[in-house]
Image (spheres, rainbow, N blue to C red):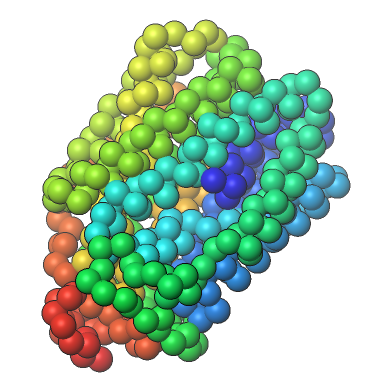
Amino acid sequence: MTAGVFTTVPGLLATPLHDQYAWDRGQIALAASVNMVLFGLTAPFAAALADRVGVRRVATGALLLVAAGALLTTGLSQPWHLVLYWGVLIGAGGGCLTMSFAAQLTGVWFVRRRGLVTGALGAAAHLGQLLFLPLLAWAVDHYHWRAPVVTLALAALVVAALVWLSLRDHPADAGVSPYGAQGFVPKPPPAAGAVRRTLSVLLAASRTGTFWLLAGLFVLCGATTNGIMWSNWVPSAHDHGMRTTAAASLLSLVGVFSSLGAVLSGWLTDRFDPRRLLCLYFAVRALTLFALPAVLSARITPSLIAFVVVYGLVDVATVPPVIALGRRAYGDDGPIVFGWVNAAHQLGAGASSFLGAAARDVFGTYDVVWTALGVACVAAALSAPAARPGRRHGDRRGRPTRPDRARHVGSGGPAPS
């Protein structure tokens, strides 16, 4: 929840920073782009590092890094300060707490209902938007942009303390079995060579078509969700005469329905073919983006509410199906593979954040951006059925197995190297 809120704040800061420092929107969006890229690139290394030192240490360190970046942002005076503090520090810290973090915890703590739990954890980031975003927007309007930044830094410090005191790395640390397991599961030894393992998993996965298809889908997914919405929605609504607080409230409402959609998608992923679900989600998202230029206005209208509801339901609904496909294809290495796929998601998000703002500077409107992103969703919907969901198994000792020789998960024996 805490990491999710940080991703939405650049959209609230864009107009105040533009007014105070006369920086171009493209300069401000560059920090958001760097944040999104590092948010993705950090994830696979954090997943491997957690296998070595534990999720508690990784999560606590990430939250401290995020808090430090936020506090330093309050003293910025140049565009590159924003890139360093919000882009690099907060991007790297938040990247340790992405959906790879959720996939890793789900794989360790749950045997049954993994799709549902993954969806619930994915919903947490958007629930954070629901709780914080309207309050932060109100603070920007009534006080100054620094007030919400300090608030978030303090929230991150509080959560870091809670994580350190309460989070456990493995069910065995708490003396319980994973949910749905047949018996007690001992804690595995720490995985050696986190960086080497992360890169070797990438090398092995990159030899499979499934990896590139999932990565390509997530490039388009990132470009059409957080990439454009979290940093450009508020400025776009402002162009139509909508107040910042109202625009932020709508974005918060997207978070509400994203939370519902993520949980529902997780439940559906446990029951239906993930490829068909991805096709459906991207198709619906395309329709909403095509309709947005016609429904966006200065007032909150029924048609705009309808957009928020439908778009929100499919916003992060793609995550549980992609995690399920990655787990089936790569077994124990699935969270690391998903980390790399999520890095592709953030590359698309970062490009969309910067190019969307740059297009606004060039064309004077976001309408061309919404249409182009709708076309991208159509391409993703047509590509999704080609993913191969065959189950494979990875090697937890640090060497990924060759996917074409690996043994079916749960076959009762170790996978061959």
Q: Residue at x 31, y 62 (%)?
A: 179
Q: Residue at x 42, y 42 (%)?
A: 123
Residue 178 placement, left or right of 40: left
User: 389 or 64, which is in the foreground?
Assistant: 64
Q: Residue at x 60, y 12 (%)?
A: 241
Residue 189 placement, left or right of 164: left
User: 186 or 271, which is in the foreground?
Assistant: 186
Q: How many discs appear?
A: 0
Residue 231 placement, left or right of 283: right
Point out residue 187 in the picture as x, y percentages from the top left corner: 41, 81
Point out residue 133 in the picture as x, y percentages from the top left corner: 60, 31
Asked whether residue 231 appears in the rendered view, the answer is no
Report which quarter residue 417 is drawn in.
Answer: bottom left
Q: Is residue 270 above or below residue 326?
A: above
Residue lying at the far bottom in this picture: please name it: 417
Q: Is residue 154 above or below residue 52?
A: above
Report which quarter residue 331 is drawn in.
Answer: bottom left
Point out residue 403 in the picture as x, y percentages from the top left corner: 21, 79
Asked whether residue 266 appears in the rendered view, the answer is yes
Q: Is residue 77 above or below residue 214?
A: above
User: 376 or 50, which is in the foreground?
Assistant: 50
Q: Residue at x 53, y 74 (%)?
A: 54
Q: Is residue 78 above or below residue 337?
A: above
Residue 320 placement, left or right of 381: right
Point out residue 382 in the picture as x, y percentages from the top left corner: 18, 44
Residue lying at the far front in this picture: please name it: 175
